[in-house]
Image: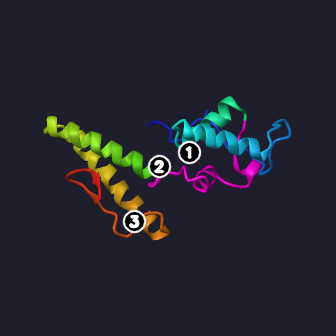
């Protein structure tokens, strides 16, 4: 039987909530970087990765006191739909198109069902939190946003 343990080769969040002493960026500079990357068309998750890898900024919140999405909302660059829900909708649309061509692909049919369950669960959460309007509805047949 394979073990259920996993290795520790993944990246971990910084332990401290304060900005590191070796990082010399000012809050205004970090916000400007976030806005610049958002105007280039990067979503919030990719902005965080770019800041971590290219600019050596481990987390934005200790520097600015705000999350990346909060900064984007202030300058009205935030997307209307949360990023995770949008990615699931794109994935469902791709799978729906695939299943129209390949009707006997039962594995991907099951995958589509699992993705749609995630969409329903996330949309229910975002409606409860007020991020999505209460009239928003996902239609499984067409995989479009209403």
Give above or below for 92 relative to 124: above
Q: Quick one: SS at disc 1?
A: helix
Pointer 2 and pointer 1: residues touching (CB < 8 Å)?
Answer: yes
Q: CA distance from mark 3 to mark 1?
A: 22 Å
Which badge, 2 or 1, is on the more N-terminal residue?
1
Q: Which residue is mark 3?
A: 124
Q: Percent from the top left, x then y, of residue 111?
A: 29, 44
Q: Percent from the top left, x then y, of residue 19?
A: 80, 45
- In which quadrant of the rendered image does the C terminus lie? bottom left
Q: Residue furthest top?
A: 54
Number of marks drawn: 3
Q: Percent from the top left, x then y, of residue 91?
A: 34, 42
Q: Is residue 86 left or right of residue 39?
A: left
- In which quadrant of the rendered image does the N terminus lie? top left
Q: Which mark is residue 44?
A: 1
Give above or below for 73 relative to 40: below
Residue 85 in view here: yes
Q: Which residue is mark 2?
A: 83
- Return the residue nearer the eye: 65 or 117: 65
């Amino acid at each position: 039987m394979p073990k259920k343990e996993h290795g520790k080769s993944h990246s971990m969040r910084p332990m401290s909530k304060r900005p590191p002493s070796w990082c010399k960026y000012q809050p205004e500079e970090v916000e400007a970087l976030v806005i610049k990357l958002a105007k280039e068309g990067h979503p919030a998750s990719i902005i965080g990765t770019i800041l971590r890898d290219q600019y050596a900024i481990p987390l934005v919140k200790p520097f600015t006191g705000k999350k990346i999405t909060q900064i984007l909302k202030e300058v009205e660059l935030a997307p209307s739909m949360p990023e995770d829900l949008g990615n699931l909708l794109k994935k469902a649309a791709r799978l729906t198109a695939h299943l129209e061509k390949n009707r006997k692909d039962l594995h991907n049919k099951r995958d589509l069902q699992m993705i749609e369950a995630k969409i329903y669960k996330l949309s229910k959460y975002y409606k409860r939190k007020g991020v999505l309007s209460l009239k928003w509805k996902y239609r499984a047949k067409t995989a479009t946003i209403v």
